Image (tube, grey):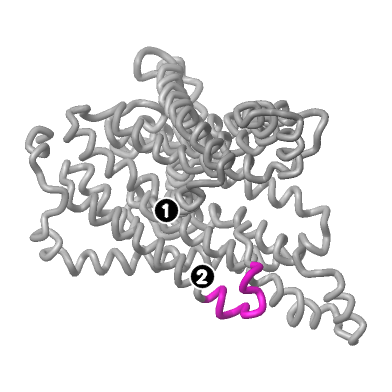
Amino acid sequence: MILAQADEPLVEPEWVMRNLDRIGERLVEHAYLTVLAVGIGLAICIPLGILAYRHRRIYPPVTWLAGFLYTIPSLALFAFLTAYTGLTTLTAEIGLVSYTLLILIRNVVAGLDSVPLDTKESARAMGYTDRQLLLKVELPLALPVILAGVRVATVTTIGLVTVTSLIGKGGLGFFILQGMRRFFNTPIVVGAVLSVLLAVSADLALLGLQKAATPWARNRARTA
Amino acid sequence: MGVIGEAIQWLTDPVNWAGDGGIPHRMLEHMEISGLTVLAAALIAIPAGLAIGHSGRGRFLVVSLSNVGRAIPSFAILALALPITIKLGLGLGFWPTFFALFALAVPPILTNTYVGVAEVDRDLVEAARGMGMADGQILRRLELRLAAPVIMVGLRTAAVEVVATATLAALVAWGGLGRFIIDGFAVRDDARILGGAILVAVLAIATELVLGGVERLARPRTVSVRA
């Protein structure tokens, strides 16, 4: 089996043509798992980040916890969770969301921190309430840094989704695992190349969004 | 307690601590391949990063390498290394794992070395030059020392990622702690999966903490540096 592979071409176009439907389905699954994870991550990190920004004492323990989750190897975390939630989308999402938290929370707080004090004081002097200040001044000005975090989280998540193939999900990772198990190059290359392309296009799309949403910050966006 | 109890039982069963398939041997295998790849990556990436940071040439290479590096899933790198090492006649096990982990470890070390050197205050470099230091001396005695904490952050990032990803090496027939998880999956043995997961997590966190300590030691004592 291994010897036969020595002369095997890297990609067999016939296999790709025969499996176009399945490739499409897995691509959609990959995007879906990613969007869901980053969306839930943001839903957790924006309120938590605002809270940590206002009550500084809770920031260190929050980042410590998020950092702890981030350090746990993905395969170990998925393996751990299957003992409780089985081979389900829930298992995949708990793991994927855990890995977005550190990046997102840091960038939400860093983004809010980057709002100049003068700007906030001017807004106050104009009679803005706390709520107006947050929604109309702080969050919009923090947006470039928050979106920079969303980009990193999205690219990382797209990579991690491939690992969830081991718990029966995986999007394009399904093909990578299938290829590894059968010593068949074509699905490995298809899965790997498409997930890289997905990551790069998501990154570029978010970069476009970041630029469109913050026309005043074109030269200031940071990738913290 | 349920599964956790079973996992603790698995972890404390002397049977699992003996022989080539035992916990100590798997742990050593895991540390061996992780250590070797990080060392190899550091030997290539630190000199390259120093040269690029010192001369300012090749910046584009570093930026694109670190961006692309982040976009490629480590799982995919490992899978792609497999056909390549088989083509080269290096087979399964050690080499595909080594190449995959190496590719994973280079970008953070290279980027941090470059950034560390490039961020050294240009006035200090000018002053050193004014004192008659040669390029090599500036690099060794000034830039390398001031960049050391940032380089250490890169090494730590790389090491933790490598330890985590080495778990997947069990898929290409290398040992390490991933064996317990992958084999546990194969026979649906939750205690073994969970026990393996706990061991890998402990090793990754220990790597993070130990290298974090080394990083504090690497900080120059008389100067303050932005890390």
Q: Is residue B19 visible?
A: yes
Q: Which three-letter amino acid code belongs to the residue tagged 2?
A: Leu
* Residue nearest the viewer, comparing A25 with B14: A25
In-image side of A145 versus B189 (left or right): right
Find disc 2 in the rendering and name its residue.
A207
Residue A187 pos. (x, y %): 20, 53
Residue most toward the top?
B19
A49 relative to B217, above or below: below
Residue most toward the bottom?
A126
In-image side of A13 versus B26 (left or right): left
**Do the CB atoms of the residues marked 1 and 2 lie less than 8 Å apart?**
no
The residue sitting at 44% across, 63% down in the picture is: A34
Number of labels in the image equals: 2
A58 relative to A138, above or below: above
Q: Which three-letter amino acid code belongs to the residue tagged 1?
A: Val
Range covered by the magenta-colored residues: A209-220
Q: CA distance from mark 1 to mark 2?
A: 15 Å
* Residue nearest the viewer, comparing B110 with A63: B110
Are there few (<14), some (14-19), or many (20+) residues within 10 Å of tag 2?
some
The residue sitting at 64% across, 29% down in the picture is: B134
Q: Magenta stretch mostly in which secondary structure?
A: helix
Mark 2 residue element: helix
* Residue nearest the viewer, comparing A55 with A83: A55
Q: Please identify the quadrant where the C terminus of chain A is shown.
A: bottom right
Mark 1 residue element: helix
In-image side of B25 versus B157 (left or right): left
Q: Is residue B6 visible?
A: no
Inspect the magenta stretch and tell me whether residue A216 lies in it.
yes
